Image (cartoon, rainbow, N blue to C red):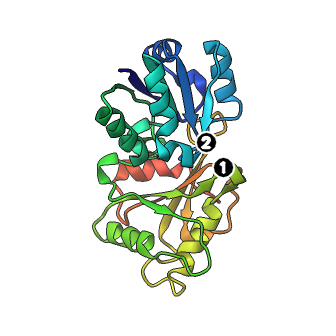
Amino acid sequence: MGELAFVGLGLGDERDLGARALDALRASGAVFAEEYTAVAAPGAIDRLAHALGHPIRRLSRAELESETPILDALRGHDRVALVVVGDPFAATTHVSLRLAAERTGHTWRYYPNASVLTAAAGFLGLTPYRFGRTVSLPFPAPGFRPRSPFDRIVENRERGLHTLVLLDLAPDGGRFLTAHDGLADLREMDPEAERLPEHALVAVVARLGRDDVAGYVGSFGAMRAADFGPPLHAIVVPAPDLHFEEEAALARFRIP
């Protein structure tokens, strides 16, 4: 039976890998990578493959969710690795794969790394203990615009909690839901600004973990007209009442 290494790439590039994770990748007979839950920095996967001296096979979402390529590789190799942008177990798909490996008699190891789930709060200077339920905004489609993300944001605010809003992406098609689009979608769910006022504070983190990372903070109304640069983006809706240190930390990101 083989061993499956779940290796977190972090939020930057291949330079964010630790020594233990690199050792695991070098010892693997087959290495896979997926970029549908998040996208690696340009060239990161290719540079990592060059450093390892063997190829890294990119898996599509359908291939990863089928579990077949990795389970097949485990039958032919003592060690197999999956490289995931961010932290491997932030996505339930990877937990499902872990369980599938266990069911078929294989073992696994976990090499964690930075995740947007905690790094967005740290970058902005918001207390991570004050975050409520994380929500995801999907691409809108005809007849499909779920209100549940907006409702969770409002519920978190009413409880005095911050909300991390993750934005949909379809890397294979070169599509990324931007913060500008996400804020517009949220306003369409509350056109009269009754539950999320125009003066409510909103933050955007762009390209977290990369050299050109940027943060923006302003009122909901002002932020909808701001330019956040290239993706990836994430939205944070802070609680209405901030701790004085949170206010001071956010001040440096205020837009004019």
1 or 2: tag closer to the N-terminus? 2
* Quarter of the rendering containing residue 163: bottom left
Residue type, label 1: Pro
How far apart, in angstroms, are the residues tagged by discs 1 and 2? 7 Å
Residue plotted at (42% across, 53% down)? 247
Badge 1 element: helix
The residue tagged 1 is 171
Residue 51 tag number:
none
* Residue 160 vertical placement versus 7 (above, below): below
Name the spot of residue 138 as percent of width and height, x first: 54, 65
Residue type, label 2: Val
Which quadrant would the N terminus be assigned to in this image?
top left
Residue plotted at (71% across, 54% down)? 173
Q: Could you say which is closer to the camera, residue 187 or residue 216?
A: 187
Which quadrant would the C terminus be assigned to in this image?
bottom right
The residue tagged 2 is 39
* Residue 231 vertical placement versus 223 (above, below): above
Badge 2 element: loop
Q: Are marks 1 and 2 in contact (CB under 8 Å)?
A: yes
Name the spot of residue 33 as percent of width and height, x first: 56, 33
Name the spot of residue 28 as percent of width and height, x first: 49, 16
Residue plotted at (34% across, 59% down)? 133
* Residue 239 vertical placement versus 214 (above, below): below
* Quarter of the rendering containing residue 2: top left
Q: Could you say which is closer to the camera, residue 111 or residue 70?
A: 70
Q: Could you say which is closer to the camera, residue 53 or residue 117?
A: 53
* Residue 49 vertical placement versus 222 (above, below): above
Residue plotted at (58% across, 21% down)? 15
- Whether residue 9 can be seen here: no
Instruction: Give the residue furthest to the bottom.
Output: 192
Name the spot of residue 103 as percent of width and height, x first: 29, 36
